[in-house]
Amino acid sequence: MEGPVRVRFAPSPTGALHIGGAHTALFNWLWARHTGGSFILRIEDTDLQRSTKEYEETILAGLRWMGLDWDEGPDVGGPCKAYRQSERQELYRQHAERLLEAGLAYRDGEAVIFRVPEGVEISFEDVVYGRVSMMSETLKDIVLMKSDGMPTYNYAVVVDDASMGINMVIRGEDHISNTPKQLLLYDALGFRRPDFGHLPMILGTDKKKLSKRHGATSVYEYRDMGYLPDAVFNFLALLGWCPRDGREVFGRSEAVRLFEIQKVTKRAAVFDMDKLNFINQEHVKSLPKMDRLEMTLPFWKELCYPVDSHEREYLADALELMEGRGQTLRKMAEFSDYFLSFDPVKARYDGSAVDEGKKPILRRFYREMLETEPWKAEEMESLARTWGTSEGIALKEIAMPLRFMLTGGKVSPGIFHVAELMGKNEVRARLSHFGMA
């Protein structure tokens, strides 16, 4: 490979940006940014029946959400920067004519077909899979231009990659079988061969090809489920590669610095939702609290919670107190509902968690707790411990009913910290509803 690295991502606008495509785009982007090279976006829209402008926009939006900016391609601007195969038909026809004139291709009606030579060993060094070799006799003649005048995939990508100066092709391992055909065309057209690196297949945890049964397959579905783009970026980077130091959670700049295309494994990668959830949770926990709030607000609003009835600082502190409970922003929004409204608490809890025989003593404690000054979690917990010792009642027998009455469930952050954040008046109102204040 000569000169700066030039890699490309070439999606077909026949659907949304799926996980496999995002994975390929990410590895191309990482290698370009690691080497100081260029990342080119090319839209392969020769399937006129299935390609749409709407799908193209969805793919671009998915790449933007992932933070995968491109140096050349749609929306970048400048001459010859919007690469779409549908706009390059004349170029394909010209090169097909060259092969016809050289006797290397022939016509079959309106189609143009490349004549595969006999007795040629076709080999290349794949940066991931090593040496790949085969004899040309195993290949059939290659259709270049179909009878409808449109180029075939194997022909168009060769012309495009060569004319765009792509010197490193990084793509899925399902394309390994296409590479020998393309190498014949590179040679026949007098183009310089690029280097190749084929990425491992992505499988579900059952070791079968990734599909909807393993989880969402569109990048945007993960956005809508409350995953952070940095977390999805981090997770996809680990499918087939890992930093030398073995770390699993890292940011973009670290990934760019550490990435080595030579360290990509050829073993199939496993799309493990548990690992994605763990990585996402770690990224959520590391967010500045006001950023976390801004990202969670849309999910609260979607759930019709009264976010505008609370100060932003209070809402941000509530999420901070959650300490990453809920592995996605959506789950965090759902789990924190009791901070925004008493209604879901009343819907979940009917008061049955308090033993009737202990209600009198607990009522006395909660009333004394409501006199605590200053209204701090440490003061309330200290009081509970002292009270429990003198009255012969365990701390959990005081704290658990309080947790149910304030949150409606048996799992929450430290309940005295929850009480402190809610404020004395709100705690009194909720305890009074259950006849315990």
Image (spheres, grey):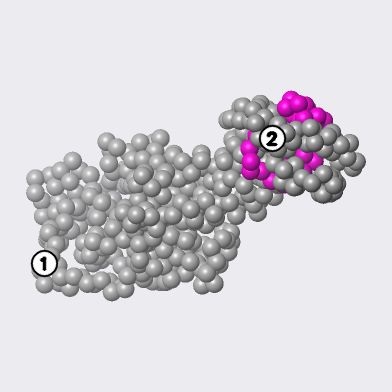
Measuring 69% from the left and 46% from the top, which residue is drawn there? 413
- Residue neighbourhood size for the residue with mark 2, other residues' Cα within 10 Å, grouped as few (<14), some (14–19), many (≥20): few
Q: Report the magenta stretch's main SS.
A: helix
Q: Which residue is mark 1?
A: 137
| Type of amino acid under label 1 | Glu
| 1 lies left or right of 424 | left
Q: Are marks 1 and 2 in contact (CB under 8 Å)?
A: no
Give the percent coordinates (x, y) of residue 315: 72, 38
> Which residue extends farthest right?
373
Q: Quadrant of residue 125?
A: bottom left
Give the percent coordinates (x, y) of residue 277: 52, 51
In the foreground, 164 or 376: 376
Q: Quadrant of residue 305?
A: top right
Give the percent coordinates (x, y) of residue 124: 27, 71
Measuring 76% from the left and 26% from the top, which residue is drawn there? 435
Label 2 SS: loop
**In the image, which residues are magenta?**
408-437
Q: Quadrant of residue 1?
A: bottom left
Image mark for residue 355 = 2
